[in-house]
Image: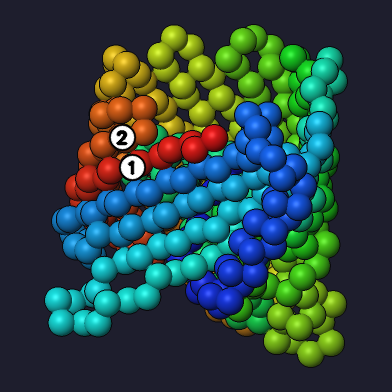
Amino acid sequence: MYKPVEPGAREAPKESLLVPCVAVFAAFAFAVVPAQASAQSVARFSIESVVAVDEFGGESASHRPEVVVDVSMAIRIGDRWQAFVRPWFRLQGPSTPTAPAPDWDKEIYQAGLEYERHGNLSTRIDLGYMLSPIGLGVFDTRPGVNPTIVRHISYHSPMPVFDPTGPQVSAVSATYPLGAEVSMSTTMWDARAAVINSAPTQRYVLGAVTNPRQTPVFVAGAGVTPATGLRVGVSVGHGAYATPDEITTPASRGRLMTMAGGEGEWAFGGTKVGGEILRTSFETMADRAIATEWFVQGTHTLSPRWFVAARREGTSAPPLVAGIIVGSRTGLAAFEATAGFRVSPDVTLRGSYYTRKSFGESTWTDQVGVSVVWAHRWW
């Protein structure tokens, strides 16, 4: 099962993208399924839906609920192949009581083919619009998977501009690029290699009008599992983060980025701890600019229904360099502590204390939030 990511606050693509993609998926499903349904043919389908409603109050809080509907649909088209598509919808309340109700954001985040072969050396191939192959944080941000309420804010907060001749970027971004990835694993190690159409410092979503220019970027990673429940890994990405069309300097060849990092996860008893650190080096019109992103989080199960979780994360952004003027580095920092209660296998309630210091700010803002998540796998 592919691992989707909670989308960020980018402008949504046109609504017309949703209907054709879902219609094609449905038509393809009926074409490959025999006319007479049976228990075996139903197993070809996999549909999972997640609905989340959350609201925060406190300093700088919007005081309006947010509703997210996240649907994953897959169909088996062979012993080892499946096609998948993932539409996503978000509704946020009006900014004031008298403001008109906003429209739903409508996007498609994943759409493609997946091949899996299990064995002593298991292999997986992903083709199409897929999950970004670098960064652990992208695995946690779907509401039904995320142990806290707030997603990894570092993945959804572009850094302040540090090169006035180039585009605004992130230290790492939650993205769904077009590409191809090959992954292999045994009980002791795993490795992956991918070519994607945009740098993992810029967010790419199928059909979004704000997408960066397409350019090939190489990503690779590997990990070892020395003991049950313990994994340590490394990853690297290299390619253009800005094409010549995105650089304001005439006759520019574009600019490269190199991202490298380490990650780890440890699960023992009722506790799971994980984290990462990523260092990204950007070419600029002057010297290279260095950005870092990191997080540490943990979840502990107190009982079959109760759990607690916490996450601490941060981003260090390069200073602005404009001619002989050099600014100061700025940072983003956040901490969230959460208590959760599983009402049923499908419904989870969460309450959180959340504090954050944004880029360029000297003080922290404190908030409290509540969330209800309904996640159901239909078959």
Q: Nearer the viewer, residue 283 or 321?
A: 283
Front-most of residues 71 and 147: 71
User: Can you say whether 151 is above or below 299 in the image?
Assistant: below
- Percent of width and height locating residue 161: 54, 73
Q: Earlier in the sequence, mark 1 or mark 2?
A: 2
Residue 328: tell me if it is visible: no
* Tag 1 residue: 373
Q: Position of residue 318 (x, y in %)?
A: 56, 62
Identify which residue is drawn at 50% across, 58% down: 88
Residue under numbered circle 2 = 348
At a point 44% along the width and 69% down the height, the residue shown is 105
Q: Is 105 above or below relative to 247? A: above
**In percent of the image, x 73 and y 55: which residue is there?**
28
Q: Quadrant of residue 223?
A: top right
Number of residues whose C-alpha sits closer than 10 Å to that of mark 1, classed few (under 14), some (14–19) or many (20 or more): many
Relative horizontal placement of residue 128, taking residue 13 as reference (left or right): right
